[in-house]
Image (cartoon, rainbow, N blue to C red):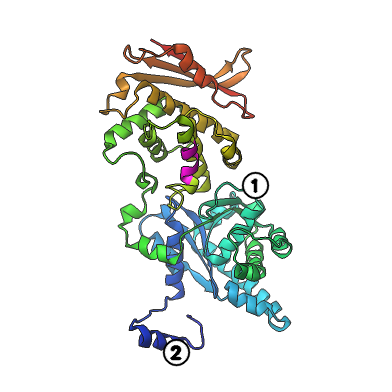
Amino acid sequence: MRTANNRDEMLRAIKTSSGLTVDILSPGMESLFGAMGARSGFTQVNGLFMDLGGGSVQMTYVDSTAGAGYDVLAAEAARSMPFGAAKLTAALSTQDTAQAAKTELRSSMKDTFEGLKDKFTRLKEQENDDGVTIYFCGGGFRGYGSMLMHTDPIQPYPIPSIGGYHVPGHRFIKWREMLHANNYEDGKIYGMSKRRREQFPAIVTVVQSLVEAIPRIKEVVFCSGGNREGVLFMKLPPENRESSPIPLLPTGSANQKKEVVDSIAMCITSALPKDYPAIFSAELLNYVAKNIWQNMGDPDDANSAKALHNPISGQLAGLPGMTHQIRGILALTMCARWGTVPGLVDKKLYENLQALIGPEMCWWCDYIGTVAGLLATLTPAFPSSEDALGKIVKFETWTGHGLGKKGHKVGIRLKIVLSEYARLGIRAGDVEGIFGRVGKGLPLGWRVEAEVEN
């Protein structure tokens, strides 16, 4: 509407029929709201933000670690290029305008990126190091993301939502393969409407120009938020905007005390060596702590299935704050907490989530889930106070070599110190045995040697 020839006529018609006055966003404000809407699903971001709509494509740079006012800097630096999916589709439909549109798009994309590099030193450093990270929002880019998901090496791809989908740069740049899939696959492609598939050649033209302008792309992230979410996000106090959304995810019982949850998470952390993966953040471990004792009256296999689906198609499915990797980690960790292997109906989902996060992360999910399951065995109800769990069990852990019967394995040595009360009805061999199954079936050869000490 911003560049429409009959813009004023449309605004008057809206005012006459509804009584509402419409303000048309400037390119800078549209870029700001789009970037903040996309950014709202993540804790910290550092990269290009791009929005491809019907009439234009926006580009800016957002570094949330830059301190107060980073959003204003992003808005001031934003640039809007008049090459949206619908507008470019029309331009590409005739030979008279197609080549000129492509040439102008390539030039605009390159000039915009070079201008952002001149303005932001950290963007130039990012390009020179591992390459640029790009966050995408808008229907056009989400369409390209849907095609990438459709052709992903993991099939069927286990997470349906496009928000939080990460793609390495070497896959993103294969626009010819994406165009071929769009042109020659007759069946329905998930996430792609008929109109989006008709516009796909124009979307690919934008991607091609982007790839030419930015030769070193490390990864791209597809975002579910847009202008609407950006407006709402900007209404939040700054301290809320910059906090992790994970602690706000619906979990546990409403009457769980924070200090007790923190003590449970600290107990889990004490069972981890110093060099455990950073993605298992304090917020993520607190989520695990809140949910250990949920649905204790239900069968373990049913709880395992619910845990597997919850971040993907359950209560957490539509909520922000999680990449696909984190969704996979939550699903597999909470599934492991119940100590059961998924049934046949969920086997493919389980295996594809494992493929998504990789064998090393799978091993840690299995281990942390097993620790959580042990805590529920030792105390079958949510602890009554912050020191209750510490009176029952303590962990000592370190990484070790020479593990296994032949001494050829590496992994974790875990000492479990139980109170006299906790030892009632617990066989040391059974406890040690559940840790012996950690990582079973994974191609790592890592193991846990657990020892129960009275």
SS class, disc 1:
loop
Location of residue 297 with respect to 158 vertically, above or below: above
| Residue plotted at (56% across, 51% down) | 166
Highlighted magenta segment, given as a residue range: 305-311
- What crowding class fits label 2: few (fewer than 14 Cα within 10 Å), some (14-19), or many (20 or more)? few
Tag 1: amino acid:
Gln
Disc 2 target residue: 9
Residue 37 visible in this rendered orientation of the protein: yes
SS class, disc 2:
helix
Q: Horizontal and vertical percent for residue 291?
A: 38, 36
Disc 1 target residue: 155
The prevailing secondary structure element of the residues shown in magenta is helix
| Residue plotted at (61% across, 12% down) | 405
| Residue plotted at (43% across, 47% down) | 316
**Quarter of the image containing the C terminus?**
top left
- Give 392 or 309, whichever is nearer the viewer: 309
Residue 418, quarter of the rendered image = top left
| Residue at mark 1 to residue at mark 2: CA–CA distance | 49 Å
N-terminal of the pair, mark 1 or mark 2, is: 2
- Confirm whether the magenta stretch covers residue 446: no
Give left or right: position of 431 versus 111. left
Q: Horizontal and vertical percent for residue 342?
A: 55, 34
Q: Horizontal and vertical percent for residue 390?
A: 31, 22
Mark 1 touches mark 2? (CB < 8 Å):
no
Give left or right: position of 304 versus 293. right
Tag 2: amino acid:
Glu
Location of residue 261 with respect to 322 vertically, above or below: above
Residue sitting at the far top: 454
Location of residue 328 with respect to 143 vertically, above or below: above
Residue 237, quarter of the rendered image = bottom left
Q: Horizontal and vertical percent for residue 432?
A: 48, 16
Location of residue 122 with respect to 58 vertically, above or below: above
